[in-house]
Each structure stands twice: as C-alpha cells, then as structure tokens.
Image: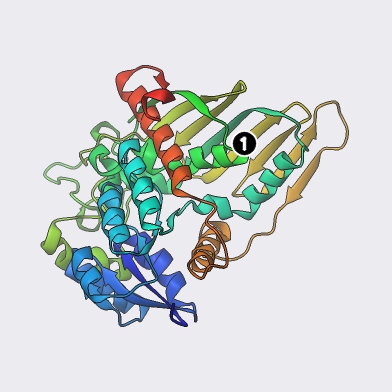
Amino acid sequence: MSEKLRVAIIGTGARGTHTFGRLFSKRNDVEIAALCDTNSVRVRAAAEILGITPNFYSSIEEMAAAEKLDGVIITTPDCEHYSCAKKALNAGWNVLIDKPLATNAKDGKELIELAQKSGKTLMIGFNLRHSEVLKRLKSFIDDGTLGKVFIAENREFYDGGRTYMARWNRFFSKTGGLWIHKASHDFDIFNWLLGFPKPLRVSSFAAVNVLDENHLPFELEEGKKPGPDCNHCPYKDKCKDKFLLSEEELKLWGDKAVAEDGYVKNLCIYLSEKDNHDNGLAMVEYEGNIKVSLFEDFIGSKSDRIYTIGGDKAVAEVSLHNQTITITPRWGGEIVTYHVQIPPGGHGGADPSLVDTFCKVLRGEATSTSTAEHGLLATALGQAAEISRREHRMVEMSELL
C-alpha cells in the first residue's frame, strides 16, 4: 500500500462530490486518484469543485484496466450499487457503499458471497452509527441503565425529504422504495442499538398524501403552466417548496449535464411522476418480544430524529437535532438530561468519522463495524416494509432471509 491511500469515487452526485469528495480531498493521507461517472460534464465539474486533478472514467471496466486503487466509494443511485460493487470487488478493490447495500436482499446476499471469496472489505456507509448522540444512547443500553429494552420508536421529520420527489429517489425502480433508500439507516440503528436480535416480521403503511398535483402551494394563473423544474418555473417566487440549484450545483446538474443523460435534479415535487411515499409508518417484531416502530414525515418544516427507548428500568428520549438524551427512571428518582457535544461536519460530525473509519480499515488499523451483513439485514427489513406497504400484508422475514 502506498504512503497515500489511492481511492476513487464512483458516482459524482451530491454525496460523491459534496460529502465524500470534500472529506477525502481535505485529508493529507488520501489521494482521490480517479472519478468515475457516465456523465462527462458532471465528473469534470466535480473535480473542479473539489480542486483536484484525478483521472476520469466513464465505466468501472475502463478504470479497472488502468488504476491500482486501495479502495473505492460507491455513491451512484441505489439501483446501481449491486452492479458497481460487483465490478469493484472483481477488480480486487476494497469497497465502501453509501447505504443501502443493494435494493433487494437477493442482490445483497450475492455481494456478501463475492466479498468473502475476494477477501476484500465491503463496508456500508451507515453514517448514523458514527453519531455521538446515538453512540452515547447505545452506551446507556449496553451498560444496563435502561434495563432490558422491549420497545423502541423513531419519529423522523425530514424537511429536505420533499426533494426526494424532485430527483431519482422518487422512483421505486431506482431505490427499491424509500423504506430501503431512507429507512435502511434507521432499521440499521434499531438493529445496532438492540444488539442485532433476529427480526421476525414487518408491517408498514405509506402513501403520498401531500406532494401531488392537488396540493400546489400557490394559485395557478391562466396561461402560466408550472414546472417542469424549479429553476425554470414561472411560480418559483411564490412557491414555498422551491428547490433552486445554486451556481455550484448548476455545474453538476445544469443544462449541459442534462443534455448528456436527461437527468433533471429539481423537477416540481408536486407534478413529477412518482411511486414512492412522502410519509409512512413501519413496525418490526424481533425475537424476545421486542417491538420497534419507525415514523417518516417528509412534509413538515423541521428535521429531527426523535427516539424513545423503553426498558424495564428506565425510558430514554432522544433528539438528534437538540443533541439531548433524557433518562427517566422507572420508579422515580432523578430525571437526567445529557447534552452531547458533537464534532463539526455533516450529519452531526458523523460523515467525517465514517470516512476516517474507512481509511483506518484500508490501512489495517481497524475492522469495519458496519458490515455487508448488517447492510443486508437493513435492506431486507426495508424490502419487507415495501412489500407490506404495496401488498397490504404482514411480511415474515423468513421470506427474504
């Protein structure tokens, strides 16, 4: 291994450029040797934004023939994770896939088998595992402060989730559903906090209640058609949900990039075609009579994950936004609220920690704690929730695992 880690980023969208690209480019021990994207405008714009001079590739096969790499980071749309990871592992590279592992359990199982045969690391980008607030919460669970945990919930409000309906995330075919794309984070956190009990069955409900053509947040004027995207919409000054691309973002997703592949990042969230939900509820039953629920709301103008964890000794209530954990003992006593200090960086300092962990894994200084097996479990739970939502039934996990 060279003195500097040589890595490549496959997929130069928002996560590839603004998160992983920026974080790796600031490190003295890493060289972003290559960027790979099917859109030549976007890949070159990403390099310009990052201030780097990597090699450019339009395919993994082309990159594999020319590059010796210590690791690659896959930040493509979810539907491409399986094929990209398969090619990367076959090329002999260690891989970090930004969640999810895959869009279904079958593909996830195949990737695990391939990683085992190749002897390479297949790590999942579960950045919430690196949240200082959630790590403190897990310590309270592990040290017995809450006693035996038997019920948990997470209520997630995601203001930015409305933009899912402006981009590729709105399609089931691209994501496997938002219970996989978005909730794989949250299912993984439940699994991790609880010590990975065996999930037995899943049920869910989800729908589009607000982000459709009947809920435009402005009055239409005669002869003025809204859309198709926010930057070109005649109502952009009136719309409270406009998603305007900045000058920097236009380098990645402006007219030149659109001319190459037709992808528009900020379609009207109300008029766009979609088959994923803007709100939902999911429940999981684990062995040992442990129950969890997940509430998703992509409509409200707030962003927070609010956890409640119930044990036979105490209840913990958590706000990621407020960085607080409140412990209420079962039989009275002092109620204590902890204010957790977090480091700088995206997702409450979790993104830099994730990148640092991957670098340590590549150097042999650490082992991955967010494994492909964990990724498979989260994907399978998300897939079960999607099946439940779409087929209106409870899903046994034995159907998928």
Q: Is residue 156 visible?
A: yes
Q: Position of residue 260 (x, y in %)?
A: 12, 63
Q: Circle 1 is placed at which residue position?
A: 194
Q: Is residue 84 above or below residue 140?
A: below
The quadrant holding residue 264 is bottom left
Q: Position of residue 213 (x, y in %)?
A: 24, 35
Q: Label 1 sits on what residue type? A: Leu
Q: Residue furthest right?
A: 333
Q: How is the image coloured?
A: rainbow
Which image quadrant: the N terminus?
bottom left
Q: Is residue 220 above or below residue 84?
A: above
Q: Position of residue 208 (x, y in %)?
A: 32, 31
Q: Is residue 379 above or below residue 386?
A: below
Q: Nearer the viewer, residue 143 or 117?
A: 117
**Which residue is found at the position 30% from the left and 83% from the top?**
53
Q: Is residue 355 above or below residue 243?
A: below
Q: Residues within 10 Å of mark 1 (few under 14, many from 20)?
A: many
Which image quadrant: the C terminus?
top left
Q: Position of residue 35 (x, y in %)?
A: 29, 71
Q: Nearer the viewer, residue 359 or 132?
A: 359
Q: Residue furthest front?
A: 117
Q: Is residue 240 visible?
A: no
Q: Nearer the viewer, residue 74 or 161?
A: 74
> What is the total number of numbered labels drawn onto the structure image?
1
Mark 1: secondary structure: loop
